[in-house]
Image: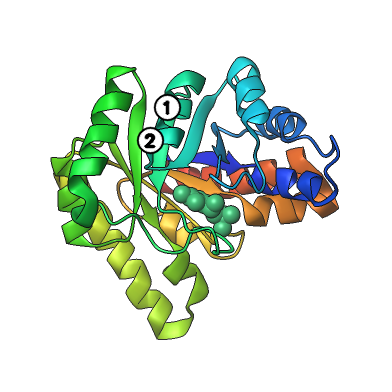
Amino acid sequence: MVTLGVNIDHVATIRQARGTAQPDPVWAAALAQLGGADCITVHLREDRRHIQDRDVEILRKTVTVKLNLECACVPEMLDLALQLSPDQVCLVPERREELTTEGGLDVAGRADQVEQAVLQLTAAGIRVSLFIDPEEAQINAAARVGAHIIEIHTGRYANSSGEDRHKELSKIELATDYAMRARLEVHAGHGLNYENVIPVAATQGMRELNIGHAIIGRAVYVGMQAAVREMKELLDSLTRRRYG
Ligand code: PXP
């Protein structure tokens, strides 16, 4: 079964556009859970462009499903992650000028730093996920530094079409298989939506998908609870097809 993590960053993006109190991502998290979310995901960026420290503090106290905190692998954010104590931390690369997270974390190139972070977080009882591109070198490095989970960056798959999309899907399938054999749990996310999610969700061994922009975009029209439920039903229909 593939579970659904709902990324609520873009609710905070709308709030920050006016510097007011609404829309509050804490409310969005409650509605996402009513809609069937298995996990609530937030990215606390160093520039605090959307999610704020206060949001994560309240979410920690109110979210009853898994709370997944995405953050950069830098001392300030790791200290905060340890204080906030989410169930899971996903380490992501971060560049201030980017619109969204572009490309995966270079675990192979920063192995010592990432290993230290994994050790610190694991000692505090937090499961650690690494957001990486579907490449063997990065998967090997993720296993070496002791990560529990990899989240495969699906941006290239989402942004391609035709034969190229087929090729990107094969990379995700091969990477999932390779990571499972390295005893890593496999998640995926970025750019997934109601039209392109099924092939990724159907990948043998895929355990969780993190989806933000598409769900928040649909919620503008149909409401948060309904937008999450629709995505959840898509994933559940796959399970029904598989197991009758
Ligand atoms: N997973 C990670 C690690 C991300 O950084 C993001 C984007 O914030 C997502 C998933 C969700 O991407 P999207 O908003 O395109 O669904």
Q: Position of residue 1 (x, y in %)?
A: 42, 39
Q: Amino acid at mark 2?
A: Pro
Q: Position of residue 13 (x, y in %)?
A: 72, 49
Point 31% across, 51% down: residue: 204
From the image, tell me which residue sits under label 1: 79
Q: Dots 1 and 2: beta carbons under 8 Å? A: yes
Q: Amino acid at mark 1?
A: Asp
Is 135 or 76 nearer to us in this picture?
A: 76
Q: Secondary structure at mark 1?
A: helix
From the image, tell me which residue sits under label 2: 75
Q: Is residue 244 visible?
A: no
The total of numbered circles placed on residues is: 2
Point 46% across, 41% down: residue: 71
Q: Position of residue 231 (x, y in %)?
A: 62, 48
| In this picture, residue 236 sits left or right of residue 2 | right
Q: Position of residue 108 (x, y in %)?
A: 19, 55
| In this picture, residue 78 sits left or right of residue 52 | left
Is 135 or 48 nearer to us in this picture?
A: 48
Please identify the residue farthest to the front as the structure is shown.
Answer: 76
Real-space Cα distance between discs 1 and 2?
A: 6 Å
Is 110 or 206 nearer to us in this picture?
A: 110
